[in-house]
Amino acid sequence: MSSAPPTPSAPHARRLPLAGVLRLAKPSEIWFKPALSVVAAIAPPAFTLLALGRLDLVMYAMAGSLCALYAHSRPYAARARALVWVVLGMLGGLGVALVAASLTGSAVVLVTVGALLAAAQKVLCDATRVGPPGNVVLTFVSSASLFAPQTLAQVPGHLALAAATGAWAWLVCMAPALVRPHGPERRATAAALKAAAGYADTGGTGEGHARARAAGYAAVQAAWQSLLSTSAPSRTRRALERLVVRAEVALAAPAQAEAGRLRAWAGSLRGTGPVPEAGLPHAAADELLGVAAARPLWSRLGPLTPLAARTALGCALAGYASLALGIGRPYWALVTAASLYQANIALTWSRAVQRVVGNVVGVLVFLAVVPLAHLGPAALVLCCLAFSFGAEVLISRNYWLGSVCVTPMALLITEFAGYQEAGTLMRERVVDTVVGALVGFVAAVAVTNRRAGDRVERALAAADRAREHTARLLAEPDPGPGPTALESARRGLAVALSELRATADAAAGEWWQRALPQERVVLAEQSGHRTLAATARRQGLLPERDPATETEDARP
């Protein structure tokens, strides 16, 4: 049984990966959306300030404009709400930073404020799952503002400018709803169908089947979250829900799934054409649509405590180290440290390598482009727009590649208040990057996450409870009023298994902890997915099997 007590062992360190850290991946399917949106959000305010001769205010305008990078994968109703919170979060961090900058000139105090802000932004972005670019942009805005010359009288005006450009960014991100109102839901459904097809290709037993299955269930869960975050049900949404159920059926019985048909359905969701009608094999199956399970926000805060501590400590120490070296912009080291922290030490190490490589190459790109940018204020604005577009085009391939564009853009932003000596900027950027990455990673190692193993145990227990509950319903002649009780149990089990896999993967990359119960995790996943298949069969979504086999599949 998976509830057996864990075997204790001495904590040990895991190897840090090097192979594949800089390997390029396929670009995101929607890379052009944030790329075009951020240009459309930055350009009008920047050129307006250029015409007014106030390029020194572009930094505050860009604070709001950069909110256009967020929430592009969300349905428009959910996107509207998420972007409001992003803009408010940006204004909150900016306001604290500007007030602090106006009240004190102590660099140590300002670095401390920046570190605390970075930790809060990290926790809130991860807990709310706001998505890329996460806390990094918010931390960049607030940290840079801490070291901008400021008086209290100027703060309301600067905040008003950021709020106005944030509202413009909101409009830019919502504009595509006029052309393709169900675009995000269609993409999420297509991703679920493609992931299910990938698992079907393995037949449930081939090479890489476990990873393909986990990716499939994660994509299906994301699709349900997308569909259920929309407004009132519509004909399009109901058709998309049927397709997601088809993806779930394929995951439950990959050997019986038709991968080609799943991919054909996914392909037909491109554009604005009609959604294919995927009839379900059971007449009552339509009643199953719209049932989902999700973890409340408060339950996601506890596991983020080590990340918050790492971020606060790492950013503070990185800023202090930069000050000790006499660098005039310690916020560069602070932001570098803030950008490192991922779900575990192994991923944090990978991000540190990517950040250093990308920034060093980006500094060389800045050296090549600075003569062009210094041709005039308009050329400076155009260069910033080009790099902001390039960063979003490249960053989904690999973080380091996007940093090649982010770095020269950040250097050029410092010149809106006046041209600076390129050699000094480049030297300080490289030093701050190395300092921030080194000190930030050391802080991550120092703040151990010994509770990672405990969270795996809790995730195992939750998966066991969800499977046993589902199995009990399966054993009853009438599991409840209509199919809702059984379907709710099935979705709850699917969520528990997805959380178990995510928790186990995150814990596997941590240092200095006891050996993880990997065998129990695998057994829990296998029995849980057998129960999911038996549940789908009971609901009429799969062909019937021998009753003895089905009972064995669902046995607690």
Image (cartoon, helix red, strand yellow):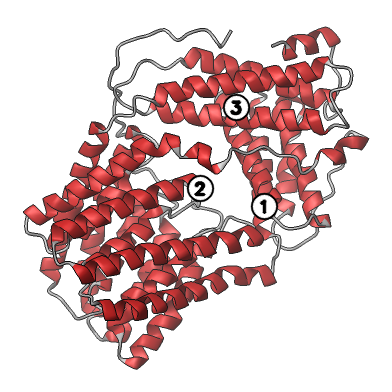
Q: Is residue 313 above or below residue 60?
A: above
**Of the residues shown, which amino acid type is indicated by label 1?**
Ser
- Residue 213 visible here: no
> Can you give x and y, in whole percent of width and height, for residue 363 in the image?
21, 61
Q: Is residue 471 above or below residue 505?
A: above
Q: Residue at x 73, y 58 (%)?
A: 231
SS of the residue at dot 1? loop
Q: CA distance from mark 1 to mark 3?
A: 22 Å
**Of the residues shown, which amino acid type is indicated by label 2?**
Arg
Q: Which residue is mark 1?
A: 229
Q: Nearer the viewer, residue 157 or 50?
A: 157
> Can you give x and y, in whole percent of width and height, for residue 113 in the image?
25, 56
| Mark with earlier residue (1, 3) | 1
**Of the residues shown, which amino acid type is indicated by label 3?**
Leu
Q: Is residue 72 above or below residue 61?
A: above
SS of the residue at dot 2? loop
Q: Residue at x 74, y 46 (%)?
A: 264
| Mark with earlier residue (1, 2) | 2
SS of the residue at dot 3? helix
In the rendered view of the protein, which quadrant contains the N terminus? top right
Tell me the crowding category of disc 3: few under 14, some 14 to 19, or many 20 or more residues within 10 angstroms, Cα based. many
To which quarter of the image does residue 340 belong?
top left
Q: Nearer the viewer, residue 480 or 135?
A: 480
Callout 1 touching callout 2 (CB < 8 Å):
no
Q: Which residue is mark 2?
A: 129
To which quarter of the image does residue 544 belong?
top right
